[in-house]
Image (tube, grey):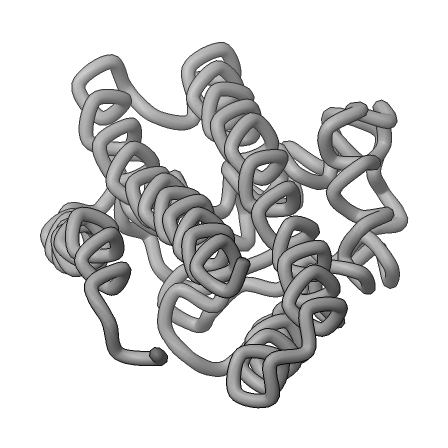
Amino acid sequence: MIFDSTFILLIPAMILAIYAQSKVQNTFNKYLRYKNVRGYTGADVARRLLDLNGLYDVPVETISGTLTDHYDPARKVMRLSREVYSGMSIAALGVAAHETGHAIQHKEGYMPLAIRNSIVPIANFGSNLAWPLFLLGLIMGITPLLDFGIILFSAVVIFQIITLPVEFNASNRAIKLLRSEGILTAEEIGPAREVLNAAALTYLAATLTAILQLLRLIILRGRRD
């Protein structure tokens, strides 16, 4: 019952996920080799854009790993990977500006971000327990467990769907700021946008995967009736 024909539903999402991961890595690595002509680092750009938007109290810190960059709304801190924090590449500046976009969203009370942040605990709970409960219900024939598993996983799907406008909006803000503040030249804006568009593919892949997984659960649930 676990490995059945419904698994075929996931193939398109798996293909997109593999492509998206390859695309973001290749694009990021490609533009890591291109330094911006004005000599800014990612940390310079983050600090400048944060201050420009009145976010003087948001520190910019380094974090280990690659593409681990993020803005933490709970602690109001931006964390950039070392190659972004200290890097002067177009890729580094694009990522730093994108994370600044999230900080600005938080300050302005951007509704999709507020909704996403509010359901993080539920989504995490659902992500950890939805499948175990569903499989237990499937094996033991306990219908309420199947339904509860579907409900929990629905929270994961909602989280992924809401993430899309949050990420797209942050990228749009990043490109506008990089252009309006003259941080990148006209020729550098295109590559920066390419880096952020590649990253957006990973969120699309995650959303498609979650939706198809939910559909799979519903189909398996229907077979028990």
* Residue 14 seen in the current view: yes
Of 27 and 164, nearer the camera is 164
Q: How many marks?
A: 0
Q: Quadrant of the N terminus?
A: bottom left
**Whole-percent x and y of residue 13?**
24, 50
Of 138 and 82, nearer the camera is 138
**Whole-percent x and y of residue 121?**
82, 64
Residue at the image point whose x is 36% and y is 40% from the top: 204
* Residue 42 seen in the current view: no
Residue at the image point whose x is 48% and y is 20% from the top: 172
Q: Is residue 22 left or right of residue 213?
A: left
**Whole-percent x and y of residue 97?**
51, 37
**Whole-percent x and y of residue 215?**
43, 47
Q: Quadrant of the C terminus?
A: bottom right
Q: Is residue 66 left or right of residue 54?
A: left
Of 18 and 97, nearer the camera is 18
Q: Quadrant of residue 160?
A: top right
Residue at the image point whose x is 83% and y is 36% from the top: 114
Q: Quadrant of residue 107?
A: top right
Q: Is residue 125 left or right of residue 220?
A: right
The relative height of residue 120 versus residue 138 in the rendered view (above or below) is: above
The relative height of residue 158 versus residue 49 in the rendered view (above or below) is: below
Residue at the image point whose x is 54% and y is 54% from the top: 43
